[in-house]
Amino acid sequence: MFLTNVLLKRVKSKHILVMLESVASGHKRSQIRERLGDKLEVVYWDPFVQKEVLYRELKKLRSL
């Protein structure tokens, strides 16, 4: 193996950017979480229904 292949190998990041979706209205927002952590379920203010609702992780957007 060449030395350049060893030196240029990318390391996986520890955090990823994920999309969260509101259970009530479908409003979406993004948040950072650890790569090895569980899927996010958090309570935030939803501007469409004017209440605090549950947001669940929908999909991964990118590595950070």
Image: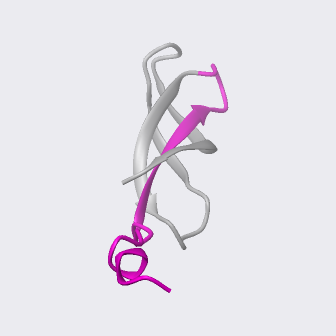
Residue 14 versus residue 20: which sits nearer the camera? 14
Viewed as shown, does residue 57 lie left or right of 62? right
Residue 52 versus residue 21: which sits nearer the camera? 21
Viewed as shown, does residue 6 lie left or right of 27? left
Residue at the spot x=45%, y=18% of the render? 50
Residue 45, image quadrant:
top left
Q: Where is residue 18 in the image (x, y as percent from the top left)?
A: 51, 45
Q: Position of residue 13 (x, y in %)?
A: 40, 66
Residue 20 versus residue 6: which sits nearer the camera? 6
Residue at the spot x=50%, y=13% of the render? 48
Q: Quadrant of the C terminus?
A: bottom left
Viewed as shown, does residue 6 lie left or right of 43? left
Give the total of numbered labels: 0
Report if residue 31 lies within the magenta region.
no
Position of 22 relative to 54 (above/below): above
Q: Position of residue 63 (x, y in %)?
A: 44, 53
Report if residue 20 lies within the magenta region.
yes
Colour pattern: one colour
Position of 8 relative to 47 (above/below): below
Position of 44 relative to 5 (above/below): above
Position of 16 relative to 38 (above/below): above
Residue at the spot x=53%, y=16% of the render? 49
Residue at the spot x=55%, y=21% of the render? 27
Toward the top, the furthest residue is 48
Q: Position of residue 11 (x, y in %)?
A: 40, 72
Residue range highlighted in magenta: 1-26
